[in-house]
Amino acid sequence: MTRNTGFHQRVAAAVADHRLRTAVRKATWQKVEAREGSLACLRNSGELRELAARIRQHTLARLPDYLEQFARNACARGAVIHFAPDAATACQTVVELARYYGSKLAVKVKSMTTEEIGLNAVLEAVGVQVVETDLGEFVVQIDRDRPSHIVTPIIHKDRRQIAEAISRRLGCEYTEDPVGLTRIIRRHLREIFRRCDLGISGVNFAVAETGTICICTNEGNGRMCTTRPRVHVAIMGIEKVVPRLCDLVVFLKLLSRSSTGQPLGSYTSLIAGPKRPGDPDGPEHLHIILLDNGRSAVLASPFAEVLCCVRCGACLNACPVYRAIGGHAYNSVYPGPIGSVLMPLLDSSGKHADLPGASSLCGACRVACPVDIDIPGLLIRLRAAQRRGQSWLKRTMMRLWGVTMRSDPTYRLGQRLLKRLLPDEGDGWTVRGLCPLARWTSARDLLRPPLKSFRQLWQEGQV
Amino acid sequence: MSGSKGGPGADASANALELLLHRLRLRPAYSTDPGLPADPAAIARQVQSDDDLLARFAAAATAAGTPVESVPAAAVSATVVSLLKEHGARTVLLSPLAGSALSVAEAEDLGRALREAGLQTTLATDDDTLFSVDAAVTGVIAAVAESGTIVCPSGPGSARGASLIPPIHVALVGSGQLLPDLCDYLAGLSAQGELPANLSLISGPSKTADIEGVLVTGVHGPGQLHVLIVR
């Protein structure tokens, strides 16, 4: 089981970190309540969710047509479309654009896609300074940390850790007050926004019928990064397209409600091309990079449903595993339930092979999902697809389990054997099973089988 | 897929995109196509046109952190003056928008009233102005009752930075500009012909809850957004 040790160690460390657990638990519950509250205000949240799922499924079924339509319309409005089959090509395209326009200072909107392709390091390596402008991402960047949530990158940090990072890296006065910390960051980034010459963003949605890209933020950094610099480069996964503006409405209504509990985030930008003649401000050049990076292969696989995801983060907040271990233990760009499906599919190196196991399959993620992705079902199918990679011990045990459960005599034998392997430790629970169950019980307490089974009681006429 | 001045790599990547589309078309399509719903608004709509739009707008905007006041047209100048003075603004950017409650003529009247009250006004949209004024007053092209949203477009004379960079944003909304639902605005947009390069749907002041879930306003955009509905 060597390939599991890294993941298991990270989980054990996360579970032992009291501060982390407290911070993550508090923040996720707050978000769960906000989401449920705002969805309850809709007259028909169930119907809206079905509608959203249907539009996503239809779009994926006709993805080539909609992508082409989007590219054509975006071009007609003055955007330049690039296509990147993989992360390296996407990064290289941004590097070439930065060189072409002579960009030295890039500002970034929070974007999971740019995390996925590891853009910052590549740009820094060629001498372009990159500044994250989402407050959470900014703290992550100056503290040389990693984001641990799709929507709230510093969910794992409490205010003291944030205050220490800010005062240490920016050399300013120490304050733990969220308002004071925000003021410091505002002042610092305002100067950057005056000087920056390249804006980099992801894309929340792309509208095929108009060639519009849609970017949603609460802080206004999305608007700053797409207004201030003379060049705007947007990187979008090929699955982000929606057919029409009237379809976009459905997702806008669900996205903010699902991620932060707002009817609509503070700023929703609809961008159709670069600045027009007569516009006082705005970027002179707009480049849109369509990123595949494994998505077209997923689309052709039995796991295509995962591409319906709108990255709202609701499944992370709802997941009891995520709430217990936070995002870093997953050691992946996309953590939580959706990450456990997405990462092994996008990255076939085997690095993320453990993630489908990081779920109790309770189904809370599916209930929370605004586009009704069957995340537990996908996890089960991923586990099945990975069966070959499992240790012989686990495979043998599972085969034995199958044989035992399928016939009456072996089931009875198994029952008797189990009582021996699971010693009663007083309260009816087994904390330390005997070999070969020791490994199982190292992470789970098992309820000990009752002294007399239902079958015995039945035979003795007691039921 | 690229314009004549596409920049580096655009033509090569356009070819690559053609290849991808071709490859995707050859592959078996994703499951079964449930079909595109003809009218998503029938399900998505939350606010009807016969609802009390002003009350709905005010409730949603207030919940998003935007105080809303309904004033008669004759009282707009006086209200803006007292609002800006109350919040300590001394320099004010006026960003008129044709067809809104702050047309060029109305901006002139408002500017006069502000100056008489001792405030400095400007119509300039250069960087130094945008980053130094205390407040901006703008018109909008539409407002959405459902989510308490105002819509600010880019366009000639209409700087994106006006509703973004100054710490206080006062938006004037004509009562006839109130639409019931986001469906009404976005669905109507595609029928209107050419879109502006940028449309900002603004629902409340700039905010974050990144630090321990505590709500803080004024991160990068305005810390205060005030909406006046002009009757």
Image (cartoon, helix red, strand yellow):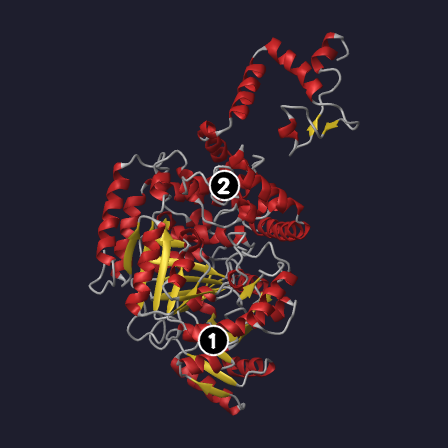
Q: Tag 1: residue type? A: Glu
User: Residue at point 52% right, 73% down?
Assistant: A188
Q: Image quadrant of residue A90?
A: bottom left
* Coordinates of residue A286 in the picture (x, y in percent): 32, 64
Give how far across and how far down residue A320 sits, in percent.
61, 42
Q: How far apart are marks 1 and 2 (CA)?
A: 39 Å
- Residue shown at 30% from the left, 75% from the top: A278
> Which residue sits at x=35%, y=42%?
A60
User: In this image, B216 relative to A290: left or right?
Assistant: right
Q: In this view, does B145 lie above or below A34?
A: below
Q: Is residue A303 left or right of residue A392?
A: left
| Residue designated by label 1 | A191
| Quadrant into which the N terminus of chain A falls | top right
Left/right placement of residue A112 relative to residue A63 reads right
Q: In this view, does A303 lie above or below A204?
A: above
- In the rendered view, tell whether residue B113 sits above or below residue A333: below
Seen from the viewer's position, the closer of residues A186 and A30 is A186
Q: Is mark 2 on a helix, strand or loop?
A: helix
Q: Which chain carries label 2?
A: A
Circle 1 sits in a helix, a strand or a loop, which is it? helix
Measuring from the top left, give residue A165's x and y in whole percent. Answer: 59, 64
What label does residue A340 carry, if any? Answer: 2
Pointer 1 local density, CA inside 10 Å: few below 14, some 14–19, many at least 20: few
- Name the mark on residue A342: none
The chain that hosts pointer 1 is A
Q: Which of marks 1 and 2 is nearer the N terminus?
A: 1
Residue A97 visible at all: yes
Three-letter amino acid code at the position of disc 2: Ser
Q: Can residue B68 be seen in this view?
A: no
Name the residue furthest right: A426
Residue B173 vs residue A36, the one in the foreground: A36
